[in-house]
Image (tube, rainbow, N blue to C red):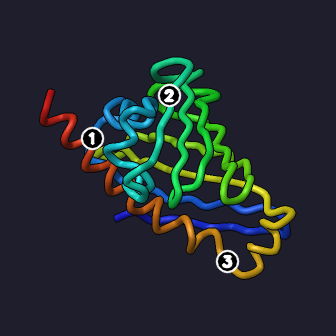
Amino acid sequence: MPCGAYTEGMSTFSVTRNALIPAKPEDVYRQVIDFHKWTAWSPWENVDPKLQRKYSGNDSGVGAHYEWAGKKAGSGSMHIDDAVSPNKINIDLRFTKPMKAVNPTVFTFTPEAGGTRVTWTMTGETKGLGRVFALFMNMDKMVGKDFEKGLIGLTNAVAADKSES
């Protein structure tokens, strides 16, 4: 079962969720380092049936780039800035619609008895309209449940990938 944490300061926030996935770190890492594989587990991929996706840069790993646009999903991009296989992936996450935001995102993969502890953290600043929005909406409540759903999806995607091997 995913568990998490949330912190919020005057102008910054951090949302974190983690789950123990019964697989080796490299098996889980492989699902996150390749944006093409996110369609199998990301909680936002099926929100908008007409979601437009564009992949560029490297196929996976550092330099991989993914852009999306849709009516329900809004638009934005992700770029893998740094990765240490199979322990950590840093993603530059940028939203352009409905609101502009930059949200550095980090996945870590830590071996534990029974599998790999995957920790998913997104940070950001609330400024401009986002600051007004943050007065009424808690980022943890908005995004935390999606992270939990995504970690369950990631667990299922890893299991499916292992069964195909």
Numbered badge on residue 55: 2
Q: Amino acid at mark 1?
A: Val
Q: Is residue 38 visible?
A: yes
Q: Secondary structure at mark 2?
A: strand
Could you tell me residue 142's position as x and y percent?
57, 70
Q: Residues within 10 Å of mark 1 (few under 14, many from 20)?
A: many
The residue that disc 1 covers is 158
Q: Is residue 87 above or below residue 130?
A: above
In space, the residues marked 3 and 2 are separated at their CA atoms by 31 Å
Mark 3 or mark 2: which comes first in sequence? Answer: 2
In space, the residues marked 1 and 2 are separated at their CA atoms by 22 Å
Q: Is residue 43 above or below residue 143?
A: above
- Image quarter for residue 90? top right
Q: Is residue 19 visible?
A: no
Mark 1 or mark 2: which comes first in sequence? Answer: 2
Q: Residue furthest top?
A: 58
Q: Nearer the viewer, residue 51 or 26?
A: 51
Could you tell me residue 50's position as x and y percent?
41, 50
Task: Indicate the quadrant containing the C terminus: top left, top right, bottom left or bottom right.
Answer: top left
Q: Nearer the viewer, residue 66 or 13?
A: 66
Name which residue lies at 79% across and 58% down.
125
Q: Amino acid at mark 3?
A: Met
Q: Are marks 3 and 2 in contact (CB under 8 Å)?
A: no
Label total for image: 3
- Horizontal relation, residue 33 to residue 93: left or right: left
Q: Nearer the viewer, residue 7 or 74?
A: 74
Q: Residues within 10 Å of mark 2 (few under 14, many from 20)?
A: some
Labels 3, 2: front one: 2
Could you tell me residue 92's position as x and y percent?
66, 38
